[in-house]
Image (tube, coloured by chain):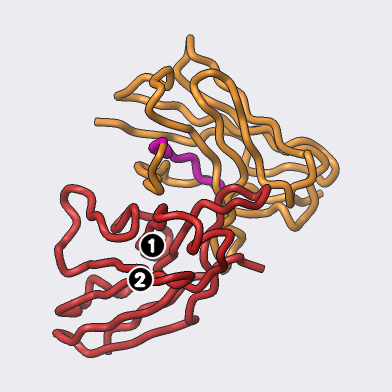
Amino acid sequence: QLQLQESGPGLVKPSETLSLTCIVSGASISSSNYYWGWIRQPPGRGLEWIGSIFYSGTSYSNVSLKRRVTISLDTSKNQFSLNLTSVTAADTAVYFCARHVTHSSSWTPWGQGMLVTVSS
Amino acid sequence: QSALTQPASVSGSPGQSITFSCSGTSSDLGAYDYVSWYQQHPGKAPKLIIYDVRHRPSGVSNRFSGSKSGNTASLTISGLQAEDEADYYCSSYTTSNTLVVFGSGTEVTVL
């Protein structure tokens, strides 16, 4: 059974870099049928796509995040990561990782989510 | 501000059917049949309930159905049950640089 699990620090200081890892179990992230992505949800608000990465390493990110996003793959550990630089309080959110089927609108499954708070 | 517009809240009595919309533009909902819907209970991760406009993943109740016309997608919940009380989000590809957009979310209340 495919499972995704976010990990990383739950507290990040303003202006620093938020770094999260999504550990994938039950399937290989090297499959050409899927993208692997990050979505976030500020407290009490809606979902926002952050970015996605393909098995080849090609990545895409939300232009609204103004080039602060880097997504990478580690196929040896079957995991992928998110780096978000120069964070502010506005980046406080629950961060989810999820699998996205290519040529489809299907995002499934999702990790349980991880609250990251930006505060000094 | 979300790119796709949903009503903030919808309510219905047990057993009733409710339908609510997800409105976009010719750059997202109007450009693709890549529309999906997610159910999110408080404190939980979103769960896929409809993908590619009208397809249900295995294990999702057939009380959930999706459709699309032009720049607007719709989700119908038939035979409303207490467990359907949750937030619902739509999502679509977009031709803009954003690539993927989500709706603003609809809170469903079972009276």
Q: Amino acid at mark 2?
A: Ala
Residue in the image at 48% along x and 62% along y = B29
Q: What percent of the width, then of the height, locates residue A102? A: 41, 35
Which disc number belongs to residue B86?
A: 2
Q: Which chain is tinted red?
A: B
Q: Amino acid at mark 1?
A: Gln
Is B5 located above or below residue B46 in the figure? below
Chain for disc number 2? B
Chain for disc number 1? B
A68 or A105, which lies in front? Answer: A105
Residue in the image at 41% along x and 77% along y = B21
Q: Secondary structure at mark 2?
A: strand
Q: Which chain is tinted orange?
A: A
Is B90 located above or below residue A33 in the figure? below
Give the magenta-colored segment's residue range.
A95-102
Q: Main secondary structure of the magenta part?
A: strand
Asked if disc 1 and disc 2 are in contact, CB closer than 8 Å, the reply is yes
For residue A96: magenta? yes
